[in-house]
Image: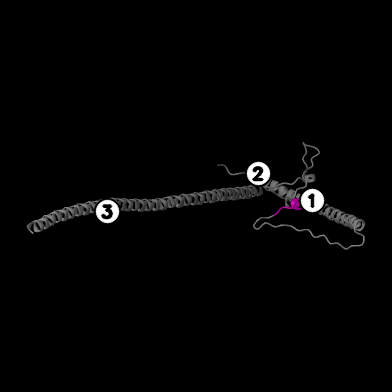
C-alpha cells in the first residue's frame, strides 16, 4: 500500500476542520432559533391560559353569580400503568425544527444545514438500533406475559369446569348411594315379609293340624262312648237274665 502524500493529508485535515466549523455554526444557529420559538410558545401559552381563565371565570359568574363552587377533577389511576395525556404528547416527541432544513437552491446547499459526522452517525444509529431492539424485546416480553395471563385464565376456567364436574359426580354418587341404601332397605323388608309369610303359613298349618287332631279326638271319644254304651247294654242284658233266673227259680 503506498503512503498518502503530504498534500492529501493536508487536504483531509482542512476538510475535517471545515466540517467541524460547520457543525458548530449549525448548533449555534439552532440554539438561537429555538430560544425565540420557546419564548413565543411560553408567551402564547400564558396568553391562552389567561384567556381561558377569563372565559371560565366569566362563565361561572354567569351561571352561578352568588355561589362559590370549586370544581375538582378526579383521575382514576390504574396500579402499574402509566397514563398518557394528549396535552403532554408534544413534550414526549423529539425536538425538530423543519425551518432549519430549508433549501432554496438544490444545486447550492446552504452550509448551515444541520450535519452529523460519520462517527457520530454510526454511534447514534447503533444506540438507536439498540434502543429499538430493547423496545422490541420488551414488547415481546409483554406479549408473552399477555399470553401467560390468557393461559392462566383458561387454566382457571378449566379448573372451574373440573370443580363443577366433580360436584356433579358427587351428586350422582350421592344418588347412587341413596339407591343402594334403599335397595338394602327393600331387601330387608322383603326378607321380613317372607318371614312373616312363613309364620302365617305355619300358623295356618298348625290350625289345620290342630283341627284334625281335635276331630280325631272327637271321633275317638265317640268310639269310646259307643263301646261304653255297648258294654253297658251287655251288662244290662246279663243283669236282666240274672234277674229272670232269680224270679223263675222262686
Near mark 1 (Cα within 10 A), the count class, few <14, some 14-19 or many ≥20, is some
Near mark 3 (Cα within 10 A), the count class, few <14, some 14-19 or many ≥20, is few
The one of 127 and 199 positioned closer to us in this rendering: 199
Where residue 196 appears, as percent x and y from the top left, is: 34, 53
Q: Which quadrant is home to the N terminus?
A: top right
Near mark 2 (Cα within 10 A), the count class, few <14, some 14-19 or many ≥20, is few
Region in magenta:
83-91
User: Residue 179 lies in magenta, yes or no?
Assistant: no
Where residue 232 appears, as percent x and y from the top left, is: 16, 56
The one of 35 and 74 positioned closer to us in this rendering: 74
Q: Nearer the viewer, mark 3 or mark 1?
A: 3
Residue 210: mark: 3
Which tag, 3 or 1, sits closer to the chain's start? 1
Residue 29: mark: 1
Q: Disc 3 to disc 1, how far (Cα)?
A: 142 Å
Q: Disc 1 to disc 2, how far (Cα)?
A: 32 Å
User: Residue 86 lies in magenta, yes or no?
Assistant: yes
The one of 245 and 20 positioned closer to us in this rendering: 245
Judged left or right of residue 123, residue 174 is left
Which tag, 1 or 2, sits closer to the chain's start? 2
Where residue 128 appears, as percent x and y from the top left, is: 64, 49
The one of 229 and 68 positioned closer to us in this rendering: 229
Q: Nearer the viewer, mark 2 or mark 3?
A: 3
Residue 147: mark: none
Residue on which the image places disc 2: 8
Q: Which quadrant is home to the C terminus?
A: bottom left
Judged left or right of residue 196, residue 115 is right
Secondary structure under the numbered disc 3 in the rendered image: helix
Image label count: 3
Magenta: main secondary structure equals: helix
Q: Disc 2 to disc 3, how far (Cα)?
A: 153 Å
Secondary structure under the numbered disc 1 in the rendered image: helix
Amino acid at each position: 500500500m503506498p503512503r498518502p502524500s503530504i498534500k492529501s493529508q493536508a487536504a483531509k485535515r482542512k476538510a475535517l476542520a471545515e466540517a467541524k466549523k460547520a457543525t458548530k455554526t449549525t448548533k449555534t444557529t439552532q440554539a438561537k432559533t429555538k430560544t425565540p420559538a420557546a419564548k413565543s410558545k411560553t408567551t402564547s401559552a400564558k396568553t391562552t391560559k389567561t384567556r381561558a381563565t377569563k372565559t371560565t371565570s366569566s362563565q361561572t359568574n354567569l351561571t352561578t353569580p352568588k355561589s362559590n363552587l370549586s370544581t375538582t377533577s378526579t383521575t382514576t389511576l390504574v396500579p402499574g400503568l402509566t397514563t398518557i395525556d394528549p396535552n403532554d404528547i408534544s413534550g414526549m416527541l423529539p425536538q425538530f425544527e423543519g425551518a432549519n432544513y430549508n433549501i432554496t437552491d438544490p444545486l447550492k446547499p446552504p452550509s448551515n444545514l444541520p450535519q452529523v459526522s460519520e462517527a457520530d452517525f454510526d454511534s447514534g444509529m447503533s444506540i438507536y438500533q439498540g434502543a429499538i431492539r430493547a423496545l422490541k424485546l420488551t414488547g415481546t416480553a409483554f406479549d408473552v406475559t399477555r399470553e401467560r395471563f390468557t393461559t392462566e385464565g383458561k387454566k382457571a376456567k378449566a379448573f372451574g369446569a373440573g370443580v363443577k364436574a366433580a360436584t356433579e359426580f358427587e351428586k350422582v354418587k350421592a344418588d347412587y348411594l341413596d339407591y343402594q341404601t334403599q335397595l338394602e332397605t327393600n331387601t330387608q323388608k322383603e326378607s321380613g315379609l317372607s318371614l312373616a309369610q312363613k309364620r302365617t303359613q305355619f300358623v295356618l298349618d298348625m290350625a289345620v293340624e290342630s283341627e284334625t287332631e281335635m276331630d280325631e279326638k272327637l271321633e275317638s271319644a265317640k268310639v269310646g262312648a259307643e263301646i261304653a254304651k255297648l258294654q253297658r247294654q251287655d251288662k244290662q242284658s246279663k243283669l236282666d237274665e240274672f234277674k229272670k233266673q232269680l224270679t223263675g227259680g222262686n
